[in-house]
Image (tube, grey):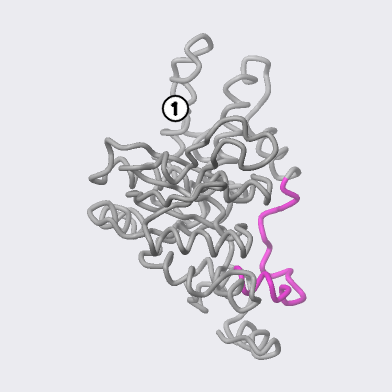
């Protein structure tokens, strides 16, 4: 079993906060739901909130709830997602996008195990399990003053890194077939009742998947609908490359070193393994060290 699956199984047996790390589209919410379903809180609710997709002025009321009349438009009392997750799991996706002021509120909730609805005067005790996810490098955000260090330590109790799809070679076949079967089951009125053939599987396994599992699902959904109109899978894969503006890297042709933010991101994705990061970037390990020294990196 792959390392991240082992860690998910271990985390399911505990009630500690879990921080899921990985590129966009790598399946972080799916991992969170899997963790919840295998935990002692499986019979409780699973409440998900994308911290980067809500207006800043509403974050606190969405987290802790609000009382009727607390602000303009508050015609009824609202529970908030923390209380909605009572007895279950609260999943905060893109936690790195949470504003500093709201980070302080979240830290207080975690410390006190209580919420104070906006406009309320009485704190309410809460009991939930927290899972967070991000594609960003939180230690870097801490150094920039964009993320609270005390909150980072609260969240980073049990970090789990999900590798990008292109690095999950041993699982690729099962992931592809699982996604295809899921699409088949969700389209009862347009079910093809066939498995992907060997050539189709090979084409999918050899694709770099910059958008990870999300992109895989998008392409297979389009293929499922369009193949009867003589649209080929290779044409959809080529279209995907154009959308993401990427090509398979030709490491021998790379002439200049990647920009520092790419070095930093790749190191983070490789768990600070410099040999792995250098190979992924298509540069020598010595070149990687040189670029890091130039930037006075703490790595």
Q: How many labels sit on residues?
A: 1
Horizontally, residue 225 falls left or right of residue 79, namely right
Q: Is residue 68 above or below residue 267?
A: above
Q: Disc 1 marks which residue?
A: 182
Residues 92 and 102: in front is 102
Q: From which residue to which does the magenta span run?
A: 244-265
Horizontally, residue 49 falls left or right of residue 263, namely left
Query: Which SS class for mark 1?
Result: helix
Residue 290 belongs to magenta span? no
- The location of residue 286, given as percent across then percent down, is 60, 87
Quarter of the image with the N terminus in it:
bottom left
Residues 99 and 57: in front is 57
Q: Examine the image and state in which quarter residue 228 appears.
A: top right
Which residue extends farthest top? 189
Residue at 66% from the left image edge and 38% from the top image edge: 237
- The location of residue 145, given as percent across then percent down, is 64, 75
Residue 248 belongs to magenta span? yes
Residues 5 and 114: in front is 114
Residue at 57% from the left image edge and 58% from the top image edge: 135
Q: Is residue 71 above or below residue 133?
A: above
Residues 37 and 55: in front is 55
Q: Is residue 104 above or below residue 88?
A: below
- The location of residue 138, given as percent across then percent down, is 55, 68
Residue at 51% from the left image edge and 40% from the top image edge: 202
Horizontally, residue 254 falls left or right of residue 9, namely right
Residue at 27% from the left image edge and 43% from the top image edge: 41
Residue 15 visible somewhere in the drawing: yes
Quarter of the image with the C terminus in it:
bottom right
């Amino acid at each position: 079993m792959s390392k991240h699956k082992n860690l998910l199984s271990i985390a399911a047996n505990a009630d500690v906060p879990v921080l899921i790390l990985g590129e966009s589209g790598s399946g972080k919410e799916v991992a969170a739901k899997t963790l919840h379903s295998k935990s002692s809180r499986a019979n409780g609710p699973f409440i998900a909130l994308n911290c980067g997709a809500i207006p800043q002025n509403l974050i606190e009321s969405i987290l802790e709830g609000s009382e009727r009349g607390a602000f303009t438009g508050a015609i009824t009392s609202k529970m908030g997602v923390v209380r909605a997750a009572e007895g279950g799991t609260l999943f905060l996706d893109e936690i790195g996008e949470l504003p500093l002021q709201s980070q302080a509120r979240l830290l207080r909730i975690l410390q006190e195990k209580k919420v104070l609805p906006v406009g309320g005067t009485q704190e309410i005790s809460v009991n939930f399990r927290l899972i967070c996810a991000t594609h960003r490098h939180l230690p870097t955000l801490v150094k920039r003053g964009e993320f609270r260090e005390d909150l980072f330590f609260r969240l980073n109790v049990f970090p789990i890194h999900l590798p990008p799809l292109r690095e999950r070679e041993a699982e690729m076949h099962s992931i592809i077939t699982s996604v295809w079967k899921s699409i088949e089951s969700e389209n009862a009125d347009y079910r093809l009742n066939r498995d992907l053939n060997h050539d189709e599987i090979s084409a999918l396994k050899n694709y770099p998947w910059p958008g990870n599992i999300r992109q895989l699902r998008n392409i297979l959904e389009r293929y499922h609908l369009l193949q009867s109109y003589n649209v080929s899978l290779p044409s959809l894969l080529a279209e995907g490359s154009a959308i993401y503006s990427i090509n398979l890297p030709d490491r021998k042709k790379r002439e200049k070193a990647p920009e520092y933010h790419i070095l930093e991101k790749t190191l983070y994705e490789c768990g600070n393994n410099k040999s792995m990061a250098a190979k992924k970037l298509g540069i020598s390990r010595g070149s990687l060290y040189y670029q890091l020294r130039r930037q006075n990196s703490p790595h």
